[in-house]
Amino acid sequence: METTQSRPTYHYQKPLQVRVANIGLQGLYYIMIIFVGVLFLFPWVWLLSTSLKPPTQIMQIPPRLIPNPFMWINYQYAVTYVNFALYLFNTLLLCVVTMLGRVISCTLVAYSISHINWAGKGPLFAIALATMMLPGQVTMIPIFIIFSKLGWVNTFLPLLVPTFFGDAFFIFMLRQFFMTIPKELTDAARLDGASHFNIYLQIVMPLATPALATMLAFTFIGTFNAFQGPLIYLKDRNLWPLSLGMQGYLMRYGGGGGTALGAMMAASVLYTLPMILVFFIAQKRFIQGIVTTGFK
Amino acid sequence: MNASEIVKKRRWSPLAKREFIAGLLFGLPWIIGVLAFQAYPMLASLYYSFTRYDIPKAPVWIGVQNFTDMFKDRFFPITLVNSGYIAIIGIPIQLVFSLICALLLNLKVKGQAIWRTIYILPVLMPEVVLAILWNWILNPNLGIVNNMLKVFGIKGPLWFTSPEWSKPSIILMQTWAVGIMIVLYLAALQGVPKEYYESAEIDGAGRWQKFWSITLPLISPVTIFQLITSISWALQYFSQVYILGIMAGGTGSMGAPRNSLLFYGLYLYLQAFVYLKMGYASALAWVLFFISALSSWLVLRFSNRYTYYEVT
């Protein structure tokens, strides 16, 4: 079907049958989207619904969707049945320090791999890629033994200190981003006599805000969620972050129905809320970042 | 100057020396990090895997006994079967479902962004909450799923409390949270140049043909990536099954019911941190690494024939 002559352009109208079939198909697609969407949405709805139910309605068969009345007191139980405030504080502490450690270490290393011309530039990058393939379990045990010999078990240190020494994934991500910073900018600074540290601090870091925001969002969500690490190192209940603290509801009431279940669902809602918040905030920053770099 | 002095000067100019020191300093956190948290632990755990290391006693060299013990361990094959089940049955289901979702989200309909958020939102649920919530939703008597099935006259299975249905329950739970796979597929779908579809249409290709011959091959890199990471993921799966174990009856009921949820990652954790058999656990960890690496390599090998990267 090749033609070397130029064709006059014309508006191609599909036959009526095809157009009607297409509209029918569109409708079908829309129904499917809604159907699947409802499937995705329903567990959330059920979570909220159970969190607001009095014990009688939780145990009710068949279960009802909308509780009556709304048992808001479940949320009060949620924060009093276990030491919710303390667990939340621990979680936030871990998150903030981890984010700090990542910002400091990963940006420095990413700068070294992207903007400094030295012999270790390539090897370090290759090592970062290689370590991403390593399952955590292989290093988990010896690291635990090191920390236990240091006497750091049952403190936050094993969870916090490593974050100041870089993370392969974020080093990789930041390095890719740093590479997009125009060389002219940094070269000009060099000519003006700026040191690497000056360039890092005053040129590269400010320009890297979108990537930093992404890294911070991912780090926050990951640390907020973290379970196995804290489980291994934090034996003292007072050190528990929220992820471990949720077990408190299970252990106290054996996971059965009743007030405990409502409270536990309410606690689950409270625990999930910050993640959703961060997602919505980061989503906008992320889009902003893409738009800005696009305009550059 | 004689010739050797000139050569020496050319190898490391003062600038190169300065740059090297700067690079070293900036890269120092990672260098220390790799040595302390990757290189040394790797070697150490390799060593431990050949020892009997029952904390707090010192490690005792026992050669390959840990590895031969694995074959005599009655739980070891169970963990492989369980993790294998999740990988071989669960992953294809998740891939197909997330592809369908991505295709739906790629359509030009109103409110696309809202649906996108709804489909991806489950990813934000903490693993602990995921397990708690789904344990409740799939509760045999009080859960909403079985009660809905009752409306259609179907007697719902015992889900997490039954050895036969516990793994499908896990798959169901995890399929709800495939948001990341959906995002990846969506990005891949949008990366397929429209011209391919247009020229296929001109050649008379139907909807199904277009999907099979254009879409699928061009998004295959995402599929390959998911397959590679899936085996490791299934072997390392931990938090959800640990919480389910606690809910089933505390730390003594891990992997319940009847070891149907005894995944490799859970078993490794128990050996190391509950039974304190660090040597055996290290051996298990290296077997995990080996299986992950082998399956990744196999996937890459077989996929070479089926992957099409975009030809620009």
Image (spheres, rainbow, N blue to C red):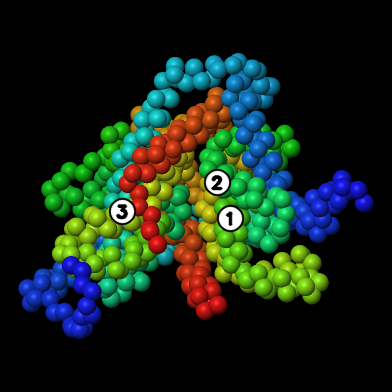
The numbered dot on residue A132 is: 2
Q: Is residue A250 above or below residue B295?
A: below
Question: Are discs 2 and 3 both within one chain?
Answer: no
Q: Position of residue B189 (x, y in %)?
A: 33, 62
Rounded to the nearest whole Å, what is the CA distance between mark 2 and mark 3? Answer: 27 Å
Give A221 or B193, whichever is nearer the viewer. B193
**Dot 2 surroundings within 10 Å: few (below 14), some, or many (20 or more)?**
few
Quarter-of-image position of residue A90: bottom right
Q: Secondary structure at mark 1?
A: helix
Name which residue lies at 53% across and 40% down.
Answer: A135
Look at the numbered discs 2 and 1 and tell me whether their residues touch, using CB distance below 8 Å: yes
* Mark 3 belongs to chain: B
Tell us which disc is closer to us: 3 or 1. 3
Q: Quadrant of the C terminus of chain A?
A: bottom right
> Could you tell me if the residues under marks 2 and 3 are in contact, i.e. CB atoms within 8 Å?
no
* Residue at numbered disc 1: A172
Q: Is B178 on the left or on the right of B143, as rendered?
A: right
x and y percentages locating residue B101 in the rendered image: 29, 59
